[in-house]
Image (cartoon, grey):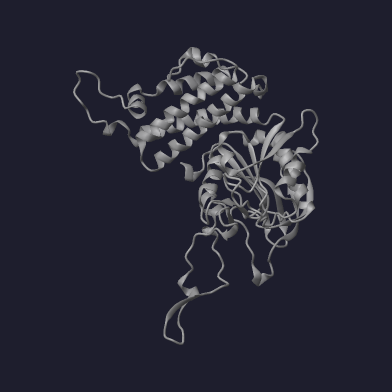
Amino acid sequence: MAAVKILSLLSKDQQEYYIFLAKECFSGFSNAEDNFNIYSYASCYAWLFHSSEFFWKALIILSGKHFEPRHEAYQDDIAKISKDLLLDKDKIIAYQILSKFSDTRRDLARYGYYEKKETIAKSPVNLFGREETETSLNEVAWLIDKLKEIHYYQIFEPPIRIGILSGYINSRKEKPCVYYQHSQYRKAVQWMLDINNIAYGEPNLFQASLTPISNLNIGTFPIIINPFGEAYPELGNAEGVGFKTILSYIRDGGIFVNSGGQPFVYSWDVLTGSYNLLVNFIPALTSIQSVYDVDGNHDLSINDNLRIPIESLPLKRHFDVGTEWDCPEINIVGPQEVDIEFDRLLDENKKAKAKVFRPVKELSDNIIPLAHSYNNSIWGNVYPIVAIKFGRGFLIHTGMSLDEEREYKILLDIIRKLCIRGYQVLARPYNRISNNI
């Protein structure tokens, strides 16, 4: 694909129209994946039709053209897409995929149309099988990968819009998050000011602003920064609407930068103004003792020093990523000073010392390293800063303590390099994450 950025050539209304269509395309595909995973194949098809329709309509709008108000894509529709976005050979593949969908399945799944006048009614039960649904899902995935690659090139044209979580979920009546666990050097407003002051030229590289979590999924911000470190704003004390909105934002193509430590360890309840440890596990029975008080009343005594299993943390449960943890028996507690080195994705062989905290243990197919630390005397080989693939987007895990200026500036530098060059690697197609198919 030709790396041509043409979004800025459109009017503001056209830009927002394209972003809306692209966002709906990604979101529809996520819904298709979810329905496939719960064996709801008709609903999966319905979302595949939705996603594929928004695919070609988004690219026509991005090309500065208009489309007819219909659901099917014809060859003249595909021809309207700029060659700067899709090469001729890719247009052929796209049209083949779009034209393969069965009209019968589409009409039944989307609109309920099935029987024709004066025909004998037939059961639609066997119309949606697993094998053909999976084939269609994989074919539409090709369209999604193409649009994501194109989309990243468009949204990373300066000034790049960055949202800084303000601490609110939706209303100014809430009690905003003020808990900056392992990210105390800068507050949310200071993050915004520092990001906007990053020198690049004309126009400025970034256009940063504060945002509540409720604004994440309207497509305004290609990048969101969580300045609260291991905490995040939530409605209640469990994985509620705040966490689910963040997951949806990432899965539908967003890049979520977590500022320090392990993401999502604590939730900040905006209703009560208090933080909670966000884990999901039952202590092992060997760590619980059955005791009786002086009056003979029964009670359970739980070992206060019980170590939290990695599997209970949201990073492991939702992203399948494990990090190094405290190990008091060998005197590894809290941030540790080690040498780190930027990876090639950032196009610079930069080395620095940093206080590393909760680094990723090992790489996998869904992890792209941004900075590593090899052969250190504490953990051996670890990856403090990584991009974790999730759906169409990424969670940037920052395994450092950002309580001081040095580590804060390292992360700012990584964000700048990602947005100047590194996004081209993130834009490339990759295998879908196992928990999403």
Q: Quadrant of the rendered structure where residue 106 is? A: top left
Q: Residue 309: x percent and y percent?
A: 54, 63
Q: Quadrant of the rendered structure where residue 147 is? A: top right
Side of 343 relative to 92 (left or right): right
Is residue 280 visible in the rendered image? The answer is yes
Is residue 1 visible in the rendered image? The answer is no
Q: Residue 357: x percent and y percent?
A: 68, 58
Viewer-nearest residue: 303 or 79: 303
Viewer-nearest residue: 220 or 353: 220
Q: Is residue 65 above or below residue 343?
A: above
Q: Residue furthest bottom?
A: 294
Q: Residue 220: x percent and y percent?
A: 61, 33
Which residue lies at the image location 66% right of the left edge and 21% below the top edge? 6
Q: Is residue 145 above or below residue 175?
A: above
Q: Residue furthest top?
A: 76
Q: Quadrant of the rendered structure where residue 382 is? A: bottom right
Viewer-nearest residue: 407 or 101: 407
Which residue lies at the image location 35% right of the left edge and 26% below the top edge? 111
Query: Which corner quadrant holds the N terminus?
Result: top right
Side of 116 relative to 29 (left or right): left
Q: Residue furthest front?
A: 173
Q: Residue 232: x percent and y percent?
A: 60, 51
Which residue lies at the image location 67% right of the left edge and 57% below the top edge? 181
